[in-house]
Image: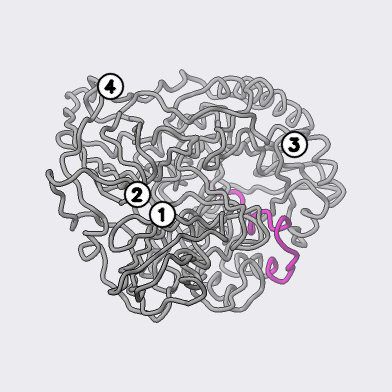
């Protein structure tokens, strides 16, 4: 049994003074076959604890079932951490932020009329109670009181940056306690007085989140909590990247000095992130700096969550790893033994010429069944959470060129007139329009909406995808819509052809590429042509999605900064491997498999100042 508690002087583990030196590693951002490897690297860094969020929307499947198997087997992750001698801190939300799609909330909540998120709205609390009812029984056997390694559980996440609903926070605390969570409960909030005031819960330990100037930040915490341990539950040692901005990095020496300053105060720490991982699939979130969902300021997060962490996205031990390990070793004992070596990587190669193509607009019947509505509806109302969504109607004619507007885009709409690309409308340019003329027979109007990540932070989280309100030709609303959800979970029905015309830019097409790999030898060794980590580059392509052997690696875009997508070793197999590109904008001709990542040009991470 493990009991983590505290008194006026600090933490106590099984009665002895204790300092938490933790690192964040999210199981949902790492292929499950690599959990053991990444936990070994985390322990080698010198930490004694691992911290992870538990995203509600990752575990709740589209049919409503809550899944804790395979990649979602959080209990297996926790037990692996225990084998590496690590205590575990869990952060089950219900809101997690984490630059994760919708901050971990399930998209179905946005189909509920009038729901208010992250507060004591009865509809939201009922949904949260259902999540806790499913989750907590999975966690109870893992608690320290029952012989497991879980020593603490966080309630909500940085709530003081969002709201002041004390009844909501009390409901979460009481719900965890009533379901049997008997370990240390705590909150984590920004190092501003108003944030600590908004997020504090009576009777629970308060901790802080920041990236620099620890003594100053802890003064804020002390004003709100005069006694007890000081802890930085998120000490930001890198930063995430947004589409179109440079890749954020933080100098290793400066980061180490900042950590040393923090540990010198006697405080405990959680390094965010010790290993960042990847926003595979559609899981990358977004920020919104505007004043409403229909204003400019939407900023999607990229696929890589490397975070300039000490353990890189593909497991490499970086300069920052060694700098931070040296500092940690001054305060807690470092594990013995050699450091893990870099995981193997595929030999570089170029894949020229697709072996087949399939035009998206010709594949709609294979990918989805239509529903009919008088007006466009967002994807959440149709039971869809992620992907693309297609809308079709007819515009009467004849008409001169009149402005076509889409009211409430989430997030990027490609418009077609009689199957020909007409242009693109983007939510960050809400007043934009496209000229559309029609002949005597009218025109078939297709609108394909690409849904990027839902906002995961701040007040603009009511971020519905698809078309939220309507489509107008001049001032006239268009009615009579055929709508096709395109979650793109199964590309098996696509009919690929190796002939036909070259694809037209702006006309979405699936491109299939293939490459063969060898089996590893009897010793498990590789030759550079056996399954191993790789980084896929798409030079000359525009924007879209990339699958490897049926698994969606994530989004790519020539806006940058990210130039390669991480393809971890467990996704490759001996024999034939298939990569499928859905290109939405500008079609390229080849793919490159590289042995080094390229996350783009760099800029200084803001965590050095926060």
Q: Are marks 2 and 1 in contact (CB under 8 Å)?
A: yes
- Figure check: 508 above or below 559: below
The picture quadrant where one finds residue 215 is top right
Front residue of this view, candidates 154 and 320: 320
Q: Residues within 10 Å of mark 2 (few under 14, many from 20)?
A: many
Give the residue number, with chain letter if any, for mark 1.
423
| Residue drawn at (52%, 62%) of the image | 105
Q: Going by the picture, which residue comes out furthest to the bottom? A: 374
Mark closest to the chain's N terminus, 1 or 3: 3
- Figure check: 482 above or below 71: below
Lateral position of residue 371 relative to residue 191, left or right? left
Give the residue number, with chain letter if any, for mark 3.
267
| Residue drawn at (70%, 68%) of the image | 170
Q: Does 154 appear in magenta?
A: yes
How far is the residue under mark 3 from the one under mark 2? 54 Å
Mark closest to the chain's N terminus, 2 or 4: 4
How far is the residue under mark 2 from the one under mark 1? 8 Å
How far is the residue under mark 4 from the one under mark 3? 45 Å
The magenta span reads: 149-170
- Which of labels 4 and 1 is toward the front? 1
**Local secondary structure at mark 4:** loop
| Residue drawn at (47%, 20%) of the image | 339
Give the residue number, with chain letter if any, for mark 2.
506
Front residue of this view, candidates 177 and 496: 496
How far is the residue under mark 1 from the one under mark 3? 55 Å
How far is the residue under mark 2 from the one under mark 4? 33 Å
**Local secondary structure at mark 3:** loop
Mark closest to the chain's N terminus, 2 or 1: 1
**Residue 453, x across and y down, in percent:** 49, 54
Q: Are marks 4 and 1 in contact (CB under 8 Å)?
A: no
């Amino acid at each position: 049994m493990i009991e983590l508690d505290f008194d006026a002087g600090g933490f106590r583990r099984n009665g002895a003074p204790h300092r938490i030196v933790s690192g964040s590693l999210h199981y949902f951002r790492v292929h499950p076959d690599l959990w053991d490897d990444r936990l070994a690297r985390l322990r080698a860094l010198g930490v004694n604890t691992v911290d992870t969020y538990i995203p509600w929307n990752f575990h709740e499947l589209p049919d409503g079932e809550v899944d804790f198997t395979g990649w979602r087997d959080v209990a297996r992750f926790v037990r692996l951490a225990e084998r590496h001698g690590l205590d575990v801190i869990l952060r089950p939300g219900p809101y997690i932020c984490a630059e994760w799609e919708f901050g971990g909330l399930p998209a179905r909540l946005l189909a509920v009329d009038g729901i208010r998120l992250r507060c004591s709205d009865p509809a939201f609390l009922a949904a949260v109670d259902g999540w806790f009812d499913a989750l907590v029984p999975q966690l109870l056997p893992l608690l320290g009181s029952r012989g497991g390694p879980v020593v603490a559980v966080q309630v909500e996440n940085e709530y003081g940056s969002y709201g002041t609903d004390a009844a909501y926070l009390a409901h979460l605390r009481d719900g965890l306690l009533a379901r049997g969570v008997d370990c240390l409960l705590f909150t984590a909030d920004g190092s501003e007085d108003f944030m600590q005031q908004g997020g504090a819960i009576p009777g629970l330990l308060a901790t802080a989140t920041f990236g620099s100037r620890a003594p100053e930040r802890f003064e804020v915490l002390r004003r709100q909590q005069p006694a007890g341990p000081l802890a930085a539950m998120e000490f930001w040692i890198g930063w995430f990247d947004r589409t179109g901005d440079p890749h954020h990095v933080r100098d290793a020496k400066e980061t180490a000095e900042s950590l040393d300053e923090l540990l010198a105060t006697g405080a405990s720490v959680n390094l965010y992130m010790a290993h960042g991982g990847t926003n595979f699939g559609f899981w990358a979130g977004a920020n919104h700096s505007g004043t409403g969902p229909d204003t400019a300021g939407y900023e999607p997060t990229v696929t890589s969550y490397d975070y300039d962490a000490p353990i890189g996205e593909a497991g490499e031990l970086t300069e920052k790893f060694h700098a931070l390990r040296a500092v940690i070793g001054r305060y807690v004992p470092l594990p013995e033994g050699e450091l893990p070596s870099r995981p193997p990587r595929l030999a570089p190669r170029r894949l020229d010429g697709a072996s087949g193509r399939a035009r998206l607009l010709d594949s709609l019947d294979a990918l989805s069944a239509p529903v009919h509505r008088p007006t466009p509806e967002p994807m959440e109302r149709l039971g869809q959470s992620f992907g693309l969504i297609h809308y079709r109607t007819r515009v009467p004619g004849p008409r001169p060129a009149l402005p076509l507007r889409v009211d409430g885009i989430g997030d990027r709409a490609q418009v077609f007139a009689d199957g020909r690309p007409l242009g693109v409308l983007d939510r960050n340019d809400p007043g934009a329009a496209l000229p559309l003329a029609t002949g005597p027979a009218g025109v078939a109007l297709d609108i394909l909406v690409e849904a990027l990540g839902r906002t995961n932070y701040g007040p603009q989280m009511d971020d519905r995808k698809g078309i939220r309100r309507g489509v107008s030709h001049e001032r006239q609303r268009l009615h009579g819509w055929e709508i096709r959800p395109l979650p793109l979970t199964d590309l098996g029905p696509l009919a690929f052809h190796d002939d036909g015309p070259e694809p037209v830019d702006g006309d979405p097409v699936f491109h299939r590429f293939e490459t063969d790999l060898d089996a590893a030898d009897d010793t498990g060794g590789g030759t550079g042509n056996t399954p191993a980590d790789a980084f896929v580059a798409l030079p000359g392509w525009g924007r879209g999605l990339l699958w490897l052997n049926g698994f969606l690696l994530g989004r790519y875009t020539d806006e940058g900064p990210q130039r390669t997508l991480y393809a971890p070793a467990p996704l490759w197999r001996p024999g034939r491997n298939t990569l499928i590109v859905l290109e939405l904008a500008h079609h390229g001709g080849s793919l490159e498999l590289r042995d080094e990542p390229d996350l783009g040009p760099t800029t200084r991470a803001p965590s050095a100042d926060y």
